[in-house]
Amino acid sequence: MTRWIGTVEHLGITRLRGPLLVVRDVHGVGWDESATVRTPDGRVRNGLVLSVDRDLAVVQVFEGTDGVGVEGTSVVFAGESTHVPVGEGWLGRVCNGRGAPIDGGPPVAGVRRAPVSGRPLNPTRREPPSEPVLTGVSAIDALTTLVRGQKLPVFSVAGLPHLELATQIAAQSTVRDAPFAVVFAGMGLTHPDVAAVRDALAERSARGELVMLLNTADDPVVERILTPRIALTVAEHLAFECGRHVLVVMADMTSYAEAVREVSADREEIPGRRAYPGYLYSDLASLYERCGRIRGVAGSVTLVPVLTMPGGDITHPVPDLTGYITEGQVVLSTAAHGSGIYPPVDPLGSLSRLMRKGAGSGRTREDHLDVAAQVMSCLSRARHVRELADLIGEEALSGTDRAYLAFAEDVERRVLSQRPDETRQIDETLDLCWRALSLLPRRELTMLAEDALARRYVARTGG
């Protein structure tokens, strides 16, 4: 060993295996500690400690071990977990999954350094989520309203446009009368996906309202584990120290969970359900529970994690455990996608448990909650009518039942469906809901107040 200023240089590398290297004669080193690897030709690479066994440490090298030899390579352990600078210098920057710039700019400067592991919010200081985050997407704003401080996941299936929806939410979302910022964390993306995300978010980034962290599928898996943690660390500072309301969009959390499983296997941990480690629930919770509001602090962190359900199985560990932690879900449907609806949201399978905290008089519009409840009730009735029509034929339905089918068609084609670059105001969305409800007989609208019906209901017929 050779001593550097304030550090110890370890030369005892015993083995290389893929992106991993094993260092001997190590003392006082812990899991998730950051490390610096210096090759014989003087190049520096970054790494993370995956496991420690007595005096052996296994380090995963972010840039891989190509060109690294056992002889002449040294490792320096930082003595701390991974830290990143935090501050408003992140706004407008595009970085890779570990926070290194890929936009041609200098390294991100901050007012201080913070550990990416973060700290859970003190439950006694949590303020209940309130006030909406309007995404400009009618299917979300009208029926599953996102609330400041909420965690609302998007459940999808491979092949559906969930990444497109995630970038649309990141590009369009706003809050009323408050400073706002978006942090987008992409994990396991293909290079065409990265290019599409950067193009879609270029305008918001140019305005200095966006932070982008983009991890690609060919990047090291351990970087994928750091990406959401760095995103949340940056968001926490912007929210709780700079007073901004911050929306964090993370896609795809299934790629993140698979990285956790792979690293767990490298650590030779005992596998649990479907080979994921037994601590997957607490690992996901350590991310999701970092959002919220703090009593007496102006800002908030709102979280929209996007995940794909392998094989469309909602009981798969990733969506299953996510559902236990979060406050609702937006579910994308293959049937809606097959019908040409974008975004292909299944409103009856979706839910925002905190919607009443962020919608209604003084927040969106006074009739919002009643209209949403009525639309959901009528969509449920329309689904039963469709099933009945499959049995007896549409011509045998009553006039009221045919009106429900026309209503459902109108909701799908006018309310739920919109262009990927279209931003809808909440008033426009609710007016479209009223237009669809006006296809039904007035006697069917039992959840709407009489004064609202008198002002907004105009009877319509036909599709």
Image (spheres, grey):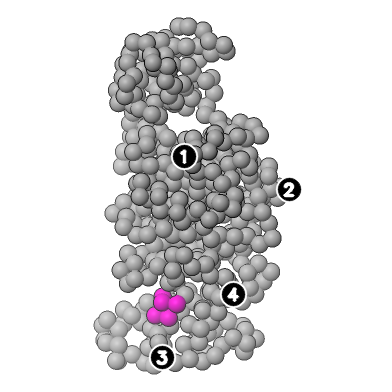
Q: Is residue 389 visible?
A: yes
Disc 3 is placed on an element classified as: loop
**Contact, mark 4 vs mark 2 (Cβ under 8 Å):** no
Q: Which mark is residue 427?
A: 4
Nearest-to-viewer mark from 1 and 3: 1
> Could you tell which of marks 1 and 3 lies nearer the N-terminus?
1
Give the alpha-carbon distance from disc 1 to disc 3, as whole Å.
Answer: 54 Å
> Could you tell which of marks 4 and 1 lies nearer the N-terminus?
1
Q: Quadrant of residue 392?
A: bottom left
Q: Relative to 349, is 238 on the left or the right?
A: right
Name which residue type carries label 2. Answer: Gly
- Residue extending farthest to the right is 296
> Could you tell which of marks 3 and 4 lies nearer the N-terminus?
4
Give the alpha-carbon distance from disc 4 to disc 2, as whole Å.
Answer: 31 Å
Q: Which mark is residue 296?
A: 2
> Could you tell which of marks 4 and 2 lies nearer the N-terminus?
2
Residue behind mark 1: 102
Disc 2 is placed on an element classified as: loop
Give the alpha-carbon distance from disc 3 to disc 4, as whole Å.
Answer: 24 Å
Nearer to us in this view, 457 or 202: 202
